[in-house]
Image (spheres, helix red, strand yellow):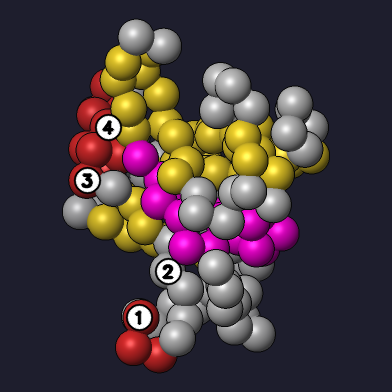
Amino acid sequence: MNVTIDANFGVALGSSSGETLLEFSDSAAKKLKAIQSEESNPALMLRVSVYGGGCSGFQYTFSLDQEVKAVDKTVEKDGVSLIIDQTSYQYLAGSEVDYSEGLEGAMFVVNNPNATSTCGCGASFSI
């Protein structure tokens, strides 16, 4: 799969432009809205980052943040925002951030088509 990231590290204009989008699923946006409500803080945003480590080489981390840095990319959906730093975006371009509830628990997850392999629990990946 070829991934195109523009010089502005991912200002996505849509599939017709050849740019790569980062998706924020309906269930992830709904869960973030619920967290904002529980915390009584509508300014909370979900930050997703990629770090070296884990069984397969890289791992995802999620945190709540209220600040967008100048080099961050934001994706908005249904009144909530997802924040990605410039370094992490190169590994996440074309991915979908989702929220999943299952036997393993409830968590935000990344569906990353760029990952060539993942560990057994899905917490780490390689490209």
Q: Relative to 55, does residue 12 appear above or below in the rendering?
A: below
- For residue 75, which quarter of the picture? bottom left
* Label 4 or label 3, whichever comes before in sequence order: 3
Q: Amino acid at mark 2?
A: Leu
Magenta residue check for 4: no
Q: CA distance from mark 1 to mark 4?
A: 25 Å
Residue carrying label 3: 26
Mark 1, residues whose alpha carbon is within 10 Å: few (<14), some, or many (≥20)?
Answer: few
Under circle 4, the secondary element is helix
Under circle 2, the secondary element is loop
Residue carrying label 2: 21
* Label 4 or label 2, whichever comes before in sequence order: 2
Task: Determine the residue located farthest toward the bottom in the rendered image.
Answer: 17
Which residue lies at the image location 28% right of the left edge and 48% below the top edge? 25
Question: Disc 4 vs disc 3: Cβ atoms closer than 8 Å?
Answer: no
Q: Amino acid at mark 4?
A: Lys
* Label 1 or label 4, whichever comes before in sequence order: 1
Residue carrying label 1: 14
Q: CA distance from mark 2 to mark 1?
A: 7 Å
Residue carrying label 4: 31
Mark 4, residues whose alpha carbon is within 10 Å: few (<14), some, or many (≥20)?
Answer: some
* Quadrant where the image shows the N terminus: bottom right
* Label 1 or label 3, whichever comes before in sequence order: 1
Looking at the rendering, the stretch of residues picked out in magenta corresponds to 82-98
Which residue lies at the image location 34% right of the left edge and 88% below the top edge? 16
